[in-house]
Image (cartoon, rainbow, N blue to C red):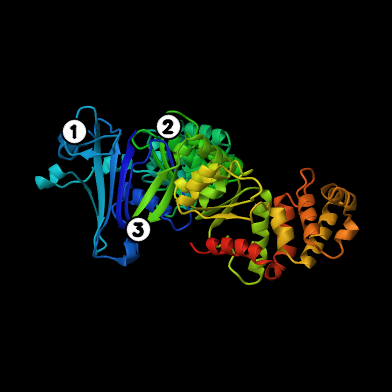
Amino acid sequence: MAQIRRIEISNFRCIEKLDWLPVAGINCLIGPGDAGKSSILDAIDFCLGARRTVQFSDADFHGLDVTSPITIAITIGDLSDALKSMDTYGSFVRSFDGATGAIDDEPETGKETVLTVQLTVGSDLDPVWTLISDRAKAQGLSRNLTWGDRTRLSPTRIGAFAENNLAWRRGSVLNRLTDEKADTSAALANAARDARKAFGDLADAQLGETLKLVAETAREVGVAAGDKLKAMLDAHSVSFSGGTVALHDENGVPLRALGVGSTRLLVAGLQRKAAKESSVLLVDELEHGLEPHRIIRLLGSIGAKETPPPIQAFVTTHSPVALRELRGDQLWVIRKLAGAHKLELVGLSDPMQSTIRAHPEAFLSRTVLVCEGASEVGLIRGLDLYFTAQGYASINAAGVALIDAGGVSKIYGRANVLRNLGFRTASLRDDDVQPDATEEGLFAFNGCPVFKWAPGQALEHAIFHGVSDAAVHRLLDRAVELHGEDLIEAHISAASNNSLTLALCRGPMTPQNRQVLATAAKWKKNAWFKTVSWMEDAARDIIGPDYRAANPAFQSVVGGLFQWCHSA
């Protein structure tokens, strides 16, 4: 089962330069949109796919610079004996050091024997595929893989036209399942209607093993295709070329009529069974057309939980469901840096894996604001809703993810995990309880902003001391709506040592009254706004509209935070 060991890309679309050593199993590329994830899958497909040409345009060159050629070099390991044949490819056989990623032109004991295929596209837009090695270049030798080897090594791609794999077309996954071949000559002699039936009867014998494997795979991945599949002439085929023979269910309905999700799920399952020579699968936006439970099934079918992995898969996703199902050693964060792209393996450390499970959406963003708790998340969400309604850009449009760290003791455990992976990260916390000073110092030292309320203040103190008298009264009314007068009265009485009542708090505001209300609002049992939804609604309806009347200290923290969110 051939595996990709190294991928080198230059001057291709948004990728100026990339040098990447993928892992043997699932390589899931994550990151913000337009980072180059799909372009990497296209590069693999164009370089290794069994095709005689690819249509390129000036737009495929990085920055439209056609003076620098596109080069895509892919080094392949775990080769069959035929691919390691010195008679066929001897001058191009190289060695690969898995520990360092180094490639040497001379095969060495203890290192893996590999071949490197390179696709080059110059300003004439004509693609050229060659095997490369310095030794062959010095001897003036040039050749590509044989067409048969290219066909066997060609990756299976599940994309917009996944249904093409449900017919016996050139390069389809069905042709890789077994060595069986269909002879259509007898059936094609009949009229179209009779031919479909006649060939269906013949194909039961000719393609029986393949049909059995497809039916078994459909049952395993949960695709309703019937128990007895048939290979019949495609009713829509107007020529007897590739695709004339297609899969049909027991009622004669073509399986390409399945939904997008079912088709992708079935093809992914078939690719695993077809992994003889080529075990490489490409899936762009793996969640497309699939419900959460079927995303999990697709990942399971390609070996997400298996050791050793059955196939090598290159996938992209924007699905939090997919991230929760995968391990950190299957996830790569893609970054566009000055002059190059970089892929960073997330890793398997306990803080990393727990952060993926708890906050997968953070790994799909550009910028992350790590909040101490749910009420901080609600505050920023609500203020953002209000500011957006006033015509300002949303922080969502800026690619900002908000995550709840679950307390001040956990805030930098989460934040430093994301910072270490290159995410633009900041923190928002209360100041009544202090975090670990060393952790926060390291976070700030690395250029990450720390937003916090005035010394000694929790969020409730910042709000009740920060907003106008009218806004305090509206917050009090909202608390009564949410929890009832009796509970609010009890909290105020307890927080003031029975010196203040709800009725008095509805009168003139004093600093002492504000302090009591802030303490009452954060009462440990039934806190007034201690959920994302409650605080979000209060921020959108009351705190946001009062923002320009708030005191300078409150405005400074909120204004600085939103300015940072939009300054990426």
State the CA–CA distance, disc 2 to disc 3. Answer: 36 Å
Residue topped by disc 3: 338
Could you tell me the amino acid type at mark 2?
A: Pro
Quarter holding the N terminus is: top left
Q: Are marks 2 and 3 in contact (CB under 8 Å)?
A: no
**Helix, strand or loop for disc 2:** loop
**Helix, strand or loop for disc 3:** loop
* Left or right: 12, with 511 as reference point: left
Residue topped by disc 2: 310
Could you tell me the amino acid type at mark 3?
A: Ala
Query: Of all residues shown, which one is farthest toward the left?
Result: 139
Q: Which is nearer the eye, 503 or 225?
A: 503
Q: Which is nearer the eye, 496 or 444?
A: 496
Query: Of all residues shown, which one is farthest toward the bottom?
Result: 391
Could you tell me the amino acid type at mark 1?
A: Pro
Q: Is residue 1 above or below residue 468?
A: above
In front of the other: label 1 or label 2?
1
**Helix, strand or loop for disc 1:** loop
Label 3: how many residues lie within 10 Å, few (<14), some (14-19) or many (20+)?
A: few
For marks 1 and 3 on the same chain, the one whose residue lies earlier in the sequence: 1
- Please report the residue visible at 57 percent of the width from the left and 63 percent of the height from the top: 560
Residue topped by disc 1: 107
Q: Are marks 1 and 3 in contact (CB under 8 Å)?
A: no
